[in-house]
């Protein structure tokens, strides 16, 4: 039986080979930087599709291969940069209440609203502004990204009120970053209210996890 491989599959296979050839000693003896490899694969996939679509029917294979290789290189670079930025953030913050998630194509800095705001308030606590100043300094150190500040609440109370509160809290955090020197053109603020929980709203512990502000760092491709 003969298997016919599409140009996109062939391109992605090539990208896999490239990422596998990374010098394992470049990032330490026990890791070849999985985040950078994930970024390379994400970039390869997007590049292959766009490259194929940009060519005519007869040249889709070439377009997919070129697109995958270019996308892979860009994605690997983004993944490596995010790894460095994540490490710097962890060293600068040192706050166990703040979580940092590196997905390979973005960083998500999650701050529990209970440490940022008093109940029903959207004024950032003065003692917590220092952490936001540290985040702002990091964002200025790595300027090539878009920053999304997203407010979330639990499900207690009126949904419309929660939506408004989440928007105000996102705006408050965005304002602190702006006042600390981050360019306003990089900052986008959103409120999601109670619509995107990460835990059950049936327990106090789950509700506490859902009340949060996320600072999402999206590298500019």
Image: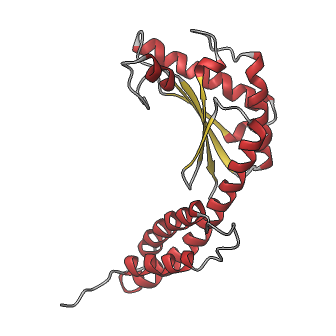
Q: Identify the residue at horizontal 65%, vertical 20% (top origin).
A: 116
Q: Is residue 204 above or below residue 198?
A: above
Tell me if residue 192 can be seen: yes
Horizontally, residue 12 falls left or right of residue 180, namely left
Which residue occupies the foreground of this view, 174 or 205? 205
Q: Is residue 18 above or below residue 96?
A: below
Quadrant (top left/top right/bottom left/bottom right) for the N terminus: bottom left
Q: Is residue 62 above or below residue 190?
A: below
Horizontally, residue 97 falls left or right of residue 160, namely right
Horizontally, residue 125 falls left or right of residue 68, namely right
Which residue occupies the foreground of this view, 128 or 77? 128
Q: Position of residue 96 (x, y in %)?
A: 66, 32
Horizontally, residue 118 falls left or right of residue 210, namely right
Q: Position of residue 175 (x, y in %)?
A: 72, 26
Tell me if residue 182 can be seen: no
Q: Position of residue 4 (x, y in %)?
A: 27, 86
Q: Residue furthest front?
A: 30
> Hey, which quadrant is residue 77 in on the image?
bottom right
**Could you tell me how many numbered marks the image carries?**
0
What's the image's color scheme? secondary structure
Q: Identify the residue at horizontal 69%, vertical 67% (top origin).
A: 28
Which residue occupies the foreground of this view, 74 or 107? 107
> Hey, which quadrant is residue 79 in on the image?
bottom right
Q: Residue furthest bottom?
A: 2
Q: Residue furthest left?
A: 1
Quadrant (top left/top right/bottom left/bottom right) for the C terminus: bottom right
Q: Identify the residue at horizontal 47%, vertical 16% (top origin).
A: 162
Q: Position of residue 156 (x, y in %)?
A: 42, 12
């Amino acid at each position: 039986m003969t298997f016919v491989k599409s140009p996109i599959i062939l391109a992605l296979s090539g990208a896999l080979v490239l990422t596998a050839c990374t010098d394992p000693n470049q990032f330490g003896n026990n890791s070849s930087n999985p985040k950078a490899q994930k970024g390379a694969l994400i970039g390869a996939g997007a590049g292959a599709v766009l490259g194929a679509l940009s060519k005519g029917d007869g040249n889709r294979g070439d377009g997919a291969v070129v697109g995958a290789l270019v996308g892979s290189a860009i994605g690997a670079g983004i993944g490596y940069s995010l790894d460095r930025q994540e490490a710097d953030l962890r060293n600068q913050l040192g706050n166990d209440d703040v979580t940092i998630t590196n997905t390979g194509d973005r960083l998500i800095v999650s701050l529990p609203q209970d440490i940022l705001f008093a109940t029903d308030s959207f004024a950032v606590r003065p003692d917590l502004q220092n952490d936001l100043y540290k985040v702002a300094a990091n964002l200025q150190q790595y300027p090539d990204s878009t920053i999304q500040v997203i407010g979330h609440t639990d499900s207690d109370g009126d949904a419309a009120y929660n939506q408004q509160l989440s928007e105000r809290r996102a705006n408050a955090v965005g304002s602190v970053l702006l006042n600390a020197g981050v360019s306003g053109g990089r900052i986008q603020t959103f409120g999601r209210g109670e619509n995107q929980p990460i835990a059950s709203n049936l327990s106090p512990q789950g509700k506490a996890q859902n009340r949060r502000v996320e600072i999402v760092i999206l590298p500019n491709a």
